[in-house]
Image: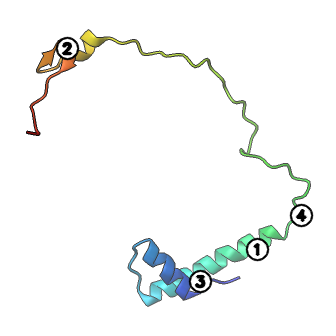
């Protein structure tokens, strides 16, 4: 399986890459080589291989979904340069 220089040029345009013709030809050859390896993998019989999401079995840790941050308004407001009750005061930017 091979990839054409035009395909590389199109992908480079989409990725906003400026490649010379020599670079496009070199990348086309490299991608063709990679696709040959994938072609060899697709010829293997994998009918007895169970689909997995990870290479090793992992236990999914579950935890109770509870809020852990308590509202500490005084601590949050401690460094506020200006405040009004429980709110930050900021300069007006829109008339």
Q: Nearer the viewer, mark 1 or mark 2?
A: 2
Q: Earlier in the sequence, mark 1 or mark 2?
A: 1
Please give the label number shown on residue 29: 3
Please give the label number shown on residue 78: 2
* Quadrant into which the N terminus falls: bottom right
Q: Nearer the viewer, mark 2 or mark 3?
A: 2
Q: Secondary structure at mark 1?
A: helix
Give the residue displayed 9% in from the left and 31% down from the top: 91
Q: Residues within 10 Å of mark 2 (few under 14, many from 20)?
A: few
Which scheme is used to colour this image of the protein?
A: rainbow
Q: Earlier in the sequence, mark 2 or mark 3?
A: 3
Q: Secondary structure at mark 4?
A: loop
Q: Does 25 sit left or right of 46 as displayed?
A: left
In this rendering, the answer to whether 47 lies above or below 1 is: above
Q: Position of residue 10 (x, y in %)?
A: 49, 81
**Outermost residue toward the right?**
48
């Amino acid at each position: 399986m091979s990839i054409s220089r035009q395909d590389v040029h199109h992908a480079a345009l989409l990725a906003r890459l400026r490649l010379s013709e020599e670079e496009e030809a070199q990348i086309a050859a490299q991608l063709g080589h990679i696709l040959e390896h994938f072609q060899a993998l697709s010829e293997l019989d994998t009918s007895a291989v169970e689909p997995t999401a990870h290479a090793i079995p992992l236990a999914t840790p579950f935890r109770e979904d509870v809020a852990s941050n308590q509202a500490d308004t005084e601590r949050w407001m401690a460094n506020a340069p200006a405040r009004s009750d429980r709110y930050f005061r900021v300069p007006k930017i829109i008339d």
